[in-house]
């Protein structure tokens, strides 16, 4: 068993680390112009994303003309480890570079690739993902937002919910039903919808942890006209696009949560040593440490399978386990602090300065975004364990 990287990979890590430390955005710049949502790309964020693109560090596994350097899968793993350790994000508009741009490259027309891909990668266009709906939750196949085709355009009517950054986004990667008579997994298409189109209304949903800076939205479409050439992929083949788009970087997106969980466990251990702790709390702390290690090594095992072209069911478990492990850890922190934890402080602060109460509230949307815990359990039950629906 090999539990370390080779010299070439460590040289890659050193080069990357040096570049990140020399070029990362300053704390002053970020504090002076904070991002208000995942659809809000501020001046410093756009400049940072552009620097990453020009240096080949935005999407290292891609070719240089797309902001990469043809990095190997192992090097890409190291890239995400180093970002997570420094608390850095490649983009404030994460869905743009991880889902939307890759999907347009895979399924888009030449005109769509030319019009959207580079502006998204350089932070000039902010995107959002229109999937969840009030009547369908995270069940994409249950969506009801309609798009009727009339010659050279679609007319869209319906509602999305939990749409991150929609109120600041320029483009919605939107799943719609184009054939209401087809089986639920069929008759779905993907439209690239201009969020500035007439008939679109966004209603931000305040967060428990930051009521002044909401990210989730309800989005309403009322007779919104979308040109036919904004159809991504084939008509009624949106399920194919969904399976491809959501697979992008699935093998390594768990790293940020794993690193954060390790860091928070270490922080809580230090704090409880200062306050003092009984046997019950020490036992719970040991369990949280084990969870953090299990998450990390489960991710590594799945990644190893991925690099060999093998199926890796571990990645269906990581999101569910990681988000709920983070919630359990922060709850232990609150209970160990006692009544003093009722003080809520943290809106607008960087992640490493947030109170445990603030961090605890943040875990709730994390169990929803990217597929709720309930949906994740259904997927694991049916696709991994092979259990019947009824």
Image (tube, rainbow, N blue to C red):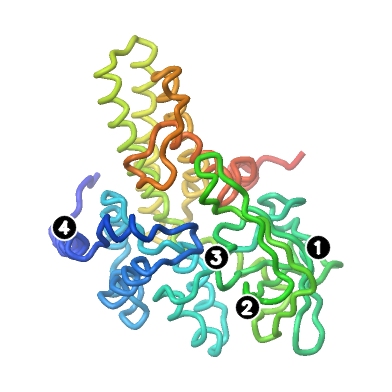
Q: Write the residue at 69% across / 65% down.
A: 201
* Residue named by callout 3: 168
Secondary structure beneath dot 2 equals strand
Give the CA distance from mark 4 to mark 3. 39 Å
* Crowding at mark 3 (Cα within 10 Å: few <14, some 14-19, many 20+): many
Q: Which label's residue is closer to the chain start, 1 or 4?
A: 4
**Residue 341 horizontal side relative to residue 88, left or right:** right
Left or right: 151, with 4 as reference point: right
The reply to whether dot 2 and dot 3 touch (C-beta < 8 Å) is no
- Residue 36 coordinates in the image, percent (x, y): 47, 57
Alpha carbons under labels 1 and 4: distance apart: 50 Å
Quadrant in which residue 349 is drawn:
top left
Q: What element carries label 4?
A: helix
Q: Determine which residue is flagged by label 2.
A: 232
User: CA gap, disc 1 to disc 3?
Assistant: 34 Å
Residue 183: which disc? Answer: 1
Residue name at image x 81 percent, y 62 percent:
183
Q: Distance between the residues labelled 4 and 2?
A: 40 Å
The mark lying in front, picked from 4 and 2, is: 2
Q: Which of marks 1 and 3 is nearer the N terminus?
A: 3
């Amino acid at each position: 068993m090999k539990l370390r990287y080779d010299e070439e990979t460590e040289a890659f890590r050193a080069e990357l680390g040096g570049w990140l430390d020399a070029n990362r955005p300053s704390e002053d710049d970020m504090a002076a112009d904070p991002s208000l949502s995942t659809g809000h790309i501020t001046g410093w964020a756009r400049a940072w994303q552009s620097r990453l693109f020009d240096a080949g560090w935005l999407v290292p596994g891609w070719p240089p003309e797309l902001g990469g350097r043809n990095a190997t899968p192992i090097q890409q793993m190291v890239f995400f480890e180093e970002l997570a350790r420094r608390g850095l994000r490649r983009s404030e508009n994460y869905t743009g570079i991880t889902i939307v741009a890759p999907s347009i490259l895979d399924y888009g027309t030449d005109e769509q690739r030319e019009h959207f891909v580079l502006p998204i990668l350089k932070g000039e266009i902010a995107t959002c993902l229109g999937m969840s709906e009030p009547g369908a939750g995270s069940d994409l196949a249950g969506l009801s937002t309609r798009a009727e085709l009339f010659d050279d355009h679609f007319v869209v009517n319906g509602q999305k919910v939990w749409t991150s950054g929609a109120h600041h986004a320029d483009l919605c990667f939107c799943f719609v039903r184009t054939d209401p008579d087809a089986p639920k997994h069929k008759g779905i298409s993907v439209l690239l919808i201009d969020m500035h189109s007439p008939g679109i209304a966004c209603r931000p949903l305040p967060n428990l942890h930051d009521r002044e800076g909401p990210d989730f939205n309800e989005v309403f479409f009322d007779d919104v006209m979308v040109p036919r050439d904004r159809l991504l992929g084939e008509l009624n083949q949106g399920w194919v696009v969904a399976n491809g788009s959501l697979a992008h970087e699935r093998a390594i997106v768990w790293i940020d949560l794993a690193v954060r969980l390790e860091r928070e466990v270490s922080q809580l251990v230090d704090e409880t040593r200062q306050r003092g702790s009984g046997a019950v709390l020490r036992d719970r702390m040991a369990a949280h440490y084990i969870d953090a290690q299990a998450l990390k090594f489960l991710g590594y095992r799945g990644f190893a399978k991925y690099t060999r072209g093998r199926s890796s069911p571990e990645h269906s478990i990581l999101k569910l386990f990681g988000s709920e492990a983070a919630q359990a850890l922060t709850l232990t922190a609150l209970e160990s602090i006692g009544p003093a934890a009722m003080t809520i402080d943290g809106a607008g602060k960087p992640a490493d300065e947030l109170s445990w109460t603030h961090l605890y509230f943040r875990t709730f949307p994390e169990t929803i975004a990217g597929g709720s815990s309930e949906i994740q359990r259904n997927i694991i039950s049916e696709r991994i364990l092979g259990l019947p629906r009824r």
